[in-house]
Amino acid sequence: MDEIKNYDKAAEIIKTAILQSQYDAARSVNEKQLALYYGVGKYISQNSRKGFWGKGAIDAISERLDKALPGLRGFTSRNLRYMRTFYEEWEILDFADRSQNTLENESGNLELMNSKLENAAIAPIWNLQVQNYRDFPMDAFLHIGFTHHRVILGKAKSIEERLYYIRRCANEHLTVESLKSSLAADDYRRQGALPNNFARTLPASEQAFRAVNAFKDEYLLDFINVEELGVRDVQDVDERTVENSIIHNVKNFILAFGKDFAFVRNQYHLDAFGEDQYIDLLFFNRELNCLVAVELKTGKFKTSYLGQLQGYLSVLDGFERKPHENPSIGLILCKDMNKSFVDYVIHDYAKPMGVATYKTSKDMSDELRKALPDVEALRKLLDDQEE
């Protein structure tokens, strides 16, 4: 028996080593690719922007590369321009080379350089240190692929916004389509923007900070298609209709809701002192280590919703919460609210709560609807990942 356990342990150790090696190899390839693209972008920028090359130079160079290296991928004229943008957009951070190596040393045979300018143009990005930006997430920057970087640079304009999406891509392993959805939903500006009383009601400041960043002020529930539900008017959609749509599309809802949420159940039954109560949707958040009660409302926010939700949270904490869990958090999802009013009244309540709004497919503009990926494509992607 001990011999079997030893074999199991040995297999587990070897498996871990193999997976770590595969991860390190993939990471190294990605870093070197980013280094090459950054360096090539710098070389192209310094020659094309200052007039050393004539008009049409990038197209001509791309054609020559295609002939010189048949089957070479990723060096079309469009991608060469993306590399130039990659360098120019991140040049403002003043990357400083800490090593004296160049990509010529790494590749051994790169014939782009024939002058001092060209020799200085391409340097290994994995040995770079950012001089003018505190807490730059270099690991996350090097972790995500060039396509992710290109999408972020195309949509996010400020450095802070770009770093937000870089961290999200690295930490949550977002696909390119998921990244585009996050950008279309403007998650950067919606993070922590919902009216809440977390700072006053949660015992630890760190827990309050995490709670603020776990929720958005508005959710795009584009999988709720009013026309498919046979409802003529958005006003005719009641809470149970929205709830049922969420249950039937719970994967998509969690994708929209955020990271680390696990679905417990809908119409969660609370029985305290002989009183039956039902929470519309109950989740557990691993990062916050707490239950999250969600109440769905199809109209405009009313103060009575807070009283109802506070009662649910009291019973959850008193009868359902485990000893190792943090206090439960409540979220009201409604169609509309006066943010200033909600932010004013919510601070009088003792339980941690927030209020957010949501939009269905009918509420979204055609432009936004087209920017979001198809629901069926998302569902297939999630199913493929599970398999």
Image (spheres, rainbow, N blue to C red):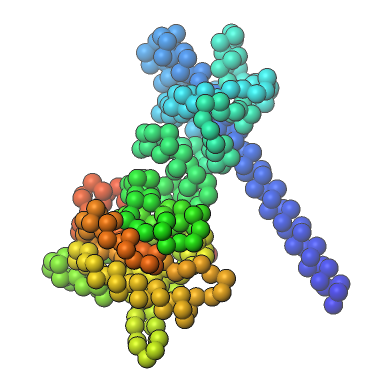
Where residue 89 sits in the image (x, y, percent)? 43, 27
Q: Nearer the viewer, residue 226 or 187?
A: 187
Q: Is residue 104 left or right of residue 301?
A: right
Position of residue 147 relative to residue 236, above or below, is above
Q: Which residue is the extreme one toward the left?
A: 232
Q: Nearer the viewer, residue 121 or 59?
A: 121
Position of residue 338 relative to residue 147, above or below, is below
Q: Is residue 218 left or right of residue 203?
A: left
Q: Nearer the viewer, residue 187 or 245?
A: 187
Q: Is residue 265 left or right of residue 109?
A: left
Q: Residue at x 85, y 77 (%)?
A: 1
Quarter where residue 101 is shown? top right
Q: In this rendering, does residue 244 appear at all? A: no
Q: Which residue is the extreme one toward the front?
A: 348
Q: Residue at x 46, y 53 (%)?
A: 209
Position of residue 47 relative to residue 134, above or below, is above
Q: In this rendering, does residue 126 appear at all? A: yes
Quarter where residue 128 is shown? top right
Q: How many marks?
A: 0
